[in-house]
Amino acid sequence: MAELKRLQRLLQIVSLLGSGKSFNARQLGELCGISRRTAFRDLAALQEAGFVILYDETQRTYRLPQRTTLPTTDFTVPEAISLLVLGLEVGAKQPHVPIWSGARSAALKLLEAMPAGTRDKIRAAAEKILIRLDGPIAPSEQLAEVFQILQEAVIDQRCIRIEYDGPSETLSTRFNPYRLLFLRRSWYAIGRSSLHRQIRTFKVAWIKKAELLDVKFVVPPRFNLDAYLGNAWHIIREPRNRQAVVIRFQPEVARNVAEIQWHKSQKLRWNADGTLTFEAVVDGLGEIAWWVLGYGDKAEVLRPAELRDIITRHARNLAALYAGGS
């Protein structure tokens, strides 16, 4: 059985036995969707992991001692606050995404396991530190379902079949997901597509349907995510179009640009007039063009000429759009 499902089942058994009620092996099997024999094996696994499971010989039932919790580490106050802020703040904003919703659930359990005085102190401190994601993912039950399947497929290395509806292509393919990546507001699945016969990147929000297959895959030993993304500005790499980009930013926005690491290759140079010269080497110009356009007339592409032409074309189209008025 898949390791992820087994772990989830073991946690479910811990939750059941820690509820204050007693269960026999048959009842645990029925509640967890497993056989009585598998329930016995799971109970033995929990005992080997250090859980004290009480057995009532008369009733032939099992339970956990009161207030049994998962083993914890002695967190410092700053460590506990950091975990709680991330789990509660981010998890609350993304309730339909398993990674973040799971972080929120874990944060609440961590908080509950603390002594009352410490718990109140840390909760009060965490409430004063806020995180607001820039453009969080819109809630979607479909996204949650697809993400759960992708997560299981990545962990267990199982093939899936996906139905994909992107802005430039609609397709169905068998997909071997090597990695799940969250980058700038969106989740992406990266792996081999049988339709394209190569590694592809799919935006998770555009996967309309995903189905786990009873087929395993092996991630190529030489696969490396950083090497795959190369010098892409964001997520779309154009390996045959590596370009050295130079952009000059006006003083009004220069400081904001300089405060952020936009790209691993970037170099900054301040000029005497307060402008900022930004340099980077990127694999493709499509994504960085939209970034430049976001700064309007406060950013000027100095080179390459191809990127200047792209910006010029967009500027002319924009001017034509507004020339006629409302």
Image (spheres, rainbow, N blue to C red):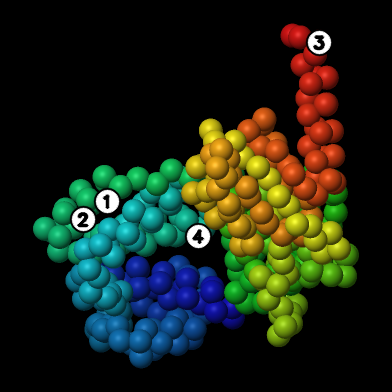
Q: Residue furthest front?
A: 272
Q: Amino acid at mark 1?
A: Ala
Q: Amino acid at mark 3?
A: Gly
Secondary element under disc 4, as helix, strand or loop, is helix
Q: Which residue is mark 4?
A: 99
Kindly indicate whether the residue at mark 3 contacts the one at mark 2 (C-beta within 8 angstroms): no
CA gap, disc 2 and disc 4 = 23 Å
Kindly indicate whether the residue at mark 1 contacts the one at mark 3 (C-beta within 8 angstroms): no
Q: Residue at x 64, y 62 (%)?
A: 265
Residue 122: assigned label: 2
CA gap, disc 1 and disc 2 = 6 Å
The nearer-to-camera label among 3 and 4 is 3
The nearer-to-camera label among 3 and 1 is 3
CA gap, disc 3 and disc 1 = 52 Å
Q: Which residue is mark 1?
A: 126
Q: Earlier in the sequence, mark 3 or mark 1?
A: 1
The x, y position of residue 140, in whole percent, is 59, 44
- Badge 3: residue crowd in 10 Å (few <14, some 14–19, many ≥20): few
Kindly indicate whether the residue at mark 4 contacts the one at mark 1 (C-beta within 8 angstroms): no
Q: Earlier in the sequence, mark 3 or mark 4?
A: 4
The nearer-to-camera label among 2 and 3 is 3
The x, y position of residue 19, in whole percent, is 28, 65
Question: In terms of image quadrants, where is residue 106?
Answer: bottom left
Kindly indicate whether the residue at mark 4 contacts the one at mark 3 (C-beta within 8 angstroms): no
Kindly indicate whether the residue at mark 2 contacts the one at mark 1 (C-beta within 8 angstroms): yes
Q: Which residue is mark 3?
A: 324
